[in-house]
Amino acid sequence: MNRRWSKLVKLSAALSMLVPLLTGCWDRLEIEDRAVVLGVSIDKAKRSSDNDEVTHHAETMPAPKMGLIRVAVQIALPGRIPLGPGEGGGGTTNPQETVWVIDVIGYTLDDAFMKLQQQVSSRIFFGHLRVIIMSEEYAKGGIDNVNDYFRRNSEVRRMAWLMVAKGNALSLLKAGPKLERIPTLYLMSALDEGINMGKFPRDYIGIFWSNSSKKGEEGYLPYVALRKEQNVEIMGLAYFQGSRMMGKTKPLQIGSFMAIKGTNPAGYRVYVMLEGTKKMVMTTTTHRNTKWTASVKDGQTHFSIKIVLEVNIEEKMSRNFYLNNAGVVRQIQDIEARKAEKFCAQLIRQTQTAGSDIFGFGEYIRAKEPRYWNANIKTKEKWQEAYKEMTFDIHAFVNVRRVGMKAT
């Protein structure tokens, strides 16, 4: 009897271990049953008959008294996205045939996506979302709703790009660039390659949220525009105060921002004209080394910023002078250093006027001068005001490393 009971116990134990392996994918969802969203655009909208009552009812569940937004999604079409460089696997080279762009009007993002779900047979899935585009008009009104909705959604990756568009954001979602079969991948690669070439700092949506949450720093986003050939230009940085866009920079000021932060690699080019002449060269920065020193004087913060730039000479536009002359090279270094100091100072003053510390000076003060911070600042709002009064000295040093070769 005991032997039979022992066998029964062993058999039950073995079966209990095998049962979890036999359950299969009980919660599986086939990819064909998902509406894979690759990109989202958000614009302000006017009242329209398209605003269906899906999440509200005029009589019993009234809608919030707020402005409307137009939300569009770019959905990948099953079987239409090419798997390789050719057109094999049922793929196509026409971007309009690989994705489907559909837009609705709603009061909030959740409201808009609920209406989209009413119009799409498959379940909307954000696991492959790569790009979120907001119009400049919408960003200046505040993006609290965008931050709240996407941060709560566990499907959204922190490596996606959030950007601000000049004009209408929907036009970028409908663009048909020639270099990519999927428009959102073109937008993503334009920014990713910008990082590799030193044209833009690393600023994914997760980094933006992190910076915006800090007491002594503000967030910034890429500011882009659609050109006539359906190509996208990075036109500058859109800088924020909290969740509200306060302004934007020029394209070359991205280089100044990266110089102040000491971000590498470097890749911006500038013209340098020798003083008192019409002799001109174009230089490119290849590397930056930046050091900050903070101090507090009479209750006011002061920063000393030392920037060292490694520079190559790319092009000479004038005759009758030679780059193998040490005096000429030294003059180029001095002129570019003075221009770099002036340009960086202008950018800092521009952000000070807006109370938008996108550099993170406040976080540096929190780390290096905690007594001053805890006694005088404490909150993000107080730093936004204190940043406007901050003083600074900028010292730039330029080293010309290469002047190129010329065969005669």
Image: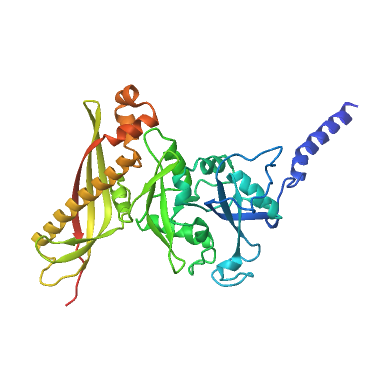
User: Residue 218, percent across and down?
Assistant: 39, 39
Q: Which quadrant does the N terminus fall into? A: top right
* Residue 181 placement, left or right of 260: right
> Seen from this angle, which residue lies furthest right?
1
User: Residue 86, percent across and down?
Assistant: 56, 72
User: Residue 253, percent across and down?
Assistant: 30, 52
Foreground residue, 133 or 20?
A: 133
* Residue 89 placement, left or right of 368: right
| Figure quadrant of residue 325 | bottom left
How many numbered badges does the structure rendering display?
0
Q: Is residue 408 above or below residue 154?
A: below
Q: Which quadrant does the C terminus fall into? A: bottom left
| x 41%, y 52%: residue | 222
Foreground residue, 293 or 101?
A: 101
* Residue 132 placement, left or right of 202: right
> Seen from this angle, which residue lies furthest bottom?
408
| x 33%, y 33%: residue | 385
| Figure quadrant of residue 64 | top right
* Residue 228 placement, left or right of 407: right
User: Residue 248, percent across and down?
Assistant: 36, 50
What color scheme is it?
rainbow
| x 37%, y 57%: residue | 235
| x 11%, y 60%: residue | 275
Q: Is residue 63 above or below residue 97?
A: above
